[in-house]
Amino acid sequence: MKTAVVTDSTAYIPKELREKLTIHMIPLSVIFGNETYQEEAEMTAADFYKEVKHKALPTTSQPPVGQFAELFEKLSQDYDAVISIHLSSGISGTFG
Protein backbone atom coordinates (compact mmCIF):
# COMPACT_ATOMS: atom_id res chain seq x y z
CA MET A 1 0.00 0.00 0.00
CA LYS A 2 1.38 3.39 -1.01
CA THR A 3 0.80 6.08 1.66
CA ALA A 4 1.22 9.85 1.28
CA VAL A 5 2.30 12.05 4.19
CA VAL A 6 0.78 15.54 4.51
CA THR A 7 1.55 18.23 7.06
CA ASP A 8 1.24 21.98 7.25
CA SER A 9 3.84 24.71 7.40
CA THR A 10 3.91 24.70 11.22
CA ALA A 11 5.98 21.51 11.02
CA TYR A 12 8.82 23.65 9.60
CA ILE A 13 10.31 20.74 7.69
CA PRO A 14 12.90 22.19 5.31
CA LYS A 15 11.88 22.11 1.64
CA GLU A 16 14.85 19.92 0.69
CA LEU A 17 13.87 17.31 3.28
CA ARG A 18 10.18 17.45 2.28
CA GLU A 19 11.19 16.83 -1.33
CA LYS A 20 13.59 14.02 -0.42
CA LEU A 21 10.98 12.24 1.73
CA THR A 22 7.98 13.20 -0.47
CA ILE A 23 6.16 14.99 2.35
CA HIS A 24 3.34 17.20 1.08
CA MET A 25 2.87 20.55 2.83
CA ILE A 26 -0.11 22.90 3.00
CA PRO A 27 0.90 26.45 4.01
CA LEU A 28 -0.86 28.47 6.68
CA SER A 29 -1.34 32.18 6.08
CA VAL A 30 0.68 34.77 8.01
CA ILE A 31 -1.01 38.16 8.10
CA PHE A 32 0.93 41.39 8.71
CA GLY A 33 -1.72 44.13 8.71
CA ASN A 34 -3.22 44.04 5.21
CA GLU A 35 -0.52 41.79 3.74
CA THR A 36 -1.02 38.02 3.66
CA TYR A 37 1.72 35.50 2.92
CA GLN A 38 1.63 31.72 2.62
CA GLU A 39 4.07 30.45 5.23
CA GLU A 40 7.03 28.51 3.80
CA ALA A 41 5.72 29.12 0.25
CA GLU A 42 5.80 32.93 0.01
CA MET A 43 7.54 33.71 3.30
CA THR A 44 10.42 31.77 4.80
CA ALA A 45 11.18 31.69 8.52
CA ALA A 46 14.07 34.11 7.88
CA ASP A 47 11.69 36.50 6.06
CA PHE A 48 9.24 36.23 8.96
CA TYR A 49 11.85 37.29 11.53
CA LYS A 50 12.91 40.24 9.36
CA GLU A 51 9.28 41.41 9.15
CA VAL A 52 8.67 41.00 12.90
CA LYS A 53 11.57 43.36 13.65
CA HIS A 54 9.79 46.20 11.83
CA LYS A 55 6.09 45.43 12.22
CA ALA A 56 3.56 44.41 14.84
CA LEU A 57 3.20 40.69 15.48
CA PRO A 58 1.17 38.98 12.78
CA THR A 59 -1.85 36.78 13.03
CA THR A 60 -2.22 33.45 11.27
CA SER A 61 -5.04 31.75 9.47
CA GLN A 62 -5.63 28.12 8.67
CA PRO A 63 -5.75 27.02 5.06
CA PRO A 64 -9.17 26.78 3.42
CA VAL A 65 -10.70 23.29 3.64
CA GLY A 66 -10.84 23.27 -0.16
CA GLN A 67 -7.05 23.40 -0.30
CA PHE A 68 -6.88 20.15 1.66
CA ALA A 69 -9.63 18.59 -0.46
CA GLU A 70 -7.79 19.55 -3.65
CA LEU A 71 -4.51 18.06 -2.41
CA PHE A 72 -6.18 14.87 -1.15
CA GLU A 73 -8.00 14.45 -4.47
CA LYS A 74 -4.71 14.84 -6.34
CA LEU A 75 -2.95 12.39 -4.02
CA SER A 76 -5.72 9.82 -4.46
CA GLN A 77 -4.55 9.34 -8.04
CA ASP A 78 -1.17 7.95 -6.92
CA TYR A 79 -1.65 6.85 -3.30
CA ASP A 80 -3.85 4.35 -1.46
CA ALA A 81 -3.91 6.28 1.84
CA VAL A 82 -2.94 9.61 3.39
CA ILE A 83 -1.49 10.31 6.82
CA SER A 84 -2.09 13.98 7.63
CA ILE A 85 -0.21 15.35 10.66
CA HIS A 86 -1.12 18.74 12.19
CA LEU A 87 -1.17 20.71 15.43
CA SER A 88 -3.68 19.92 18.16
CA SER A 89 -7.14 21.52 17.93
CA GLY A 90 -6.33 23.18 21.26
CA ILE A 91 -3.74 25.44 19.65
CA SER A 92 -4.72 25.62 15.99
CA GLY A 93 -7.72 25.69 13.70
CA THR A 94 -5.78 23.38 11.38
CA PHE A 95 -6.39 19.94 12.79
CA GLY A 96 -7.37 16.59 11.35
Image (spheres, rainbow, N blue to C red):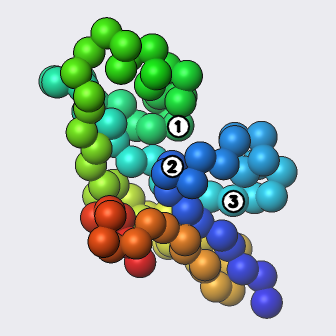
| Amino acid beneath label 3 | Ile
> Which residue in the rendered view is the most extreme toward the left?
34
The secondary structure type at the circle numbered 1 is: loop
Q: Which residue is mark 3?
A: 23
Residue 77: image x %, image y %? Answer: 63, 74
Q: Looking at the image, can residue 51 be seen?
A: yes
Mark found first going from the N terminus, 3 or 1: 3
Residue 47: image x %, image y %? Answer: 49, 20
| Amino acid beneath label 2 | Ser
Query: Where is the C terminus found, in terms of image quarters?
Result: bottom left
Question: How many numbered circles are shown?
Answer: 3
| Amino acid beneath label 1 | Glu
Categorize mark 1 by other alpha carbons within 10 Å: few (<14), some (14-19), many (20+).
many
Q: Which residue is mark 2?
A: 9
Q: CA distance from mark 2 to mark 3?
A: 11 Å
Residue 67, located in which quarter of the rendered image? bottom left
Image marks 2 and 1: residues in contact by CB distance under 8 Å: yes
